[in-house]
Image (spheres, grey):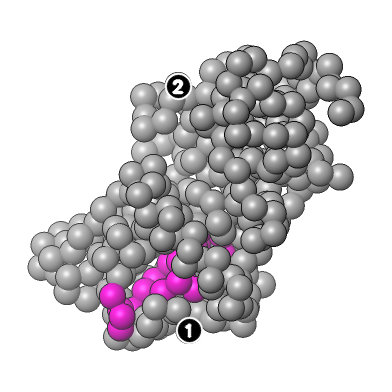
Amino acid sequence: MSALPTSSREWHLVARPHGWPEASDFALREAPVAAPGEGRVLVRNLHFSVDPYMRGRMNDVKSYTPPFKLDHPMDGGAVGEVVASNAEGFAVGDHVLHGLGWREYADVPAKHAVKVDASLAPLSAYLGVLGMTGLTAYAGLFDVASFKEGDAVFVSGAAGAVGSQVGQMAKIKGASRVIGSAGSDEKVKLLTEEYGFDAAFNYKNGPVRDQLAEAAPDGIDVYFDNVGGEHLEAAISSFNVHGRATICGMIAQYNATEPTPAPRNLALVIGKRLRLQGMLVGDHSALQPQFVQDVAGWLASGELKYRETKVEGIENGYDAFVGLLRGENTGKMIVSLDA
C-alpha cells in the first residue's frame, strides 16, 4: 500500500455572497489528512459535483438543508476511490459515492458511503444520470408530476443535467410532445437533434409565453420547472385543464437581491384546476432501486443519452460553480480530480 497523503486541498466558504458569488467569498485551503478512525474510510475524490442548490446553502437562512458553515469545507456529491479503510465491507480500491465533495481527500463515515460499479457506467455518471440529478428527473416526472402516456411535457433548463433527462424519459414513456427551453441556439439544437425533443426554443430570443405557445399549439399537461419566473408564468398560460407542474428549482432567482415578480396569472390555477408541487429529491429515496434498474437499461440500449461538462482540477472549483449559475454547462457540471 502506498503512503497516505499528509494534506488535502479543500474549498471553504469565507463570506456569504450577496447576489452573485464573488471569488473573494471562497478560499482553497490545505488541511491535514490522517488515517481513518473506526467505521470510517479515507477516499481520494475523483470527481465532485457542483449544483444550483448549493447557492442557497451559501446564505445564512433556515432551509431544507443547513447552510454551509463559514471557514469550513463545503460539501456535496462526490465519487472516489478508497485509499484506506477502517470499516467492514470496504476495501482499498473500492469506488464509493458520498457527500463530502469540494476536497481532494475525504474522511467519510462508512454508513454514508455507497459502493458503485465502474463497469456499469463511468464513475462520474453516479453524480449525474445515475445519481441525484437522474433520480430528481425520474421522481419529479413520474411521481410528483404523475406523468402518463400521451401527456405533452414542457421542461425549462432543458439542456441541464436534470432537464435533459426529464425530456428523454418522457419520450421513452410515450409523451405526445416534449418541448424544452434553453439559453443558447447551440443548446436548442442539442435538444432536438441529440435528445429527441419535439421542439425547443432559446428563451433569450423572445417572450417565453409566445415561444411556448408556438411550440405547444395544443397546450401542455406537465411542466418540469428548473427556472421559475417568466417560465412558470408561461407554463400556467399554456396548461391544459388538470395540468401538473413539478417545481424543482428557480435558478433565475437564486442570485436576486430584490424580490422577484411572481407569475402574474396565478388565478388561472383555479379554472384549470392546476397542481403545482415543490419537490426535494430526498423524499424519493424509495424509488432508487427501480430508478437504477430503469436508467441503466435505457443507457445500455442507447435510448437515454447524457452529457457532462467537466472542469479539470480542484483549483477551478469556484469557476465551475459560477459557470453553472451562468449556464455555461451542458448537462451535469463536474469538477474532475482524476488527472
Q: Left or right: where does residue 171 sit relative to residue 263? A: right
Which residue type does callout 2 highlight? Asp
Residue 156, horizontal then vertical, whole percent: 45, 63
Percent of width and height locating residue 194: 62, 78
Q: Dot 1 surroundings within 10 Å: few (below 14), some, or many (20 or more)?
A: some
- Describe residue 274's horizontal placement relative to residue 257 as left or right: left
Identify the residue shown where x is 50% and y is 49%: 132
Q: Which residue does the image show at 26% across and 66% down from the upper left?
A: 146
| Mark 2 or 1, nearer chain start | 2
- Image disc number at residue 60: 2
Q: Closest to the observer: 310 or 185?
A: 310
Residue 197 vertical position relative to residue 295 in the rendered view, above or below = below
Range shown magenta: 148-170
> Pointer 1: what residue?
198
Q: Is residue 3 visible?
A: yes
Give, as a three-letter code, the residue at label 1: Asp
Quadrant assignment, res 317: top right
3D distance between C-alphas at marks 2 and 1: 42 Å
**Residue 34 vertical placement versus 214 (above, below):** above
Examine the rendering and report whether any part of residue 103 can be seen.
Answer: no
In this view of the protein, which residue sits in the foreground, 12 or 218? 12
Classify residue 329 by image quadrant: bottom right
Query: In what element is the residue under mark 1?
Result: loop
Residue nearer the viewer, 212 or 78: 78
**Along the line of sight, the residue nearer the viewer: 292 or 172:** 292
Task: Decide whether residue 100 is among the magenta residues.
Answer: no
User: Which quarter of the rendered picture does the N terminus lie within?
Assistant: top right
State the residue at coordinates (68%, 43%).
95
Q: Residues within 10 Å of mark 2 (few under 14, many from 20)?
A: some
Q: Which disc is residue 228 wearing?
A: none
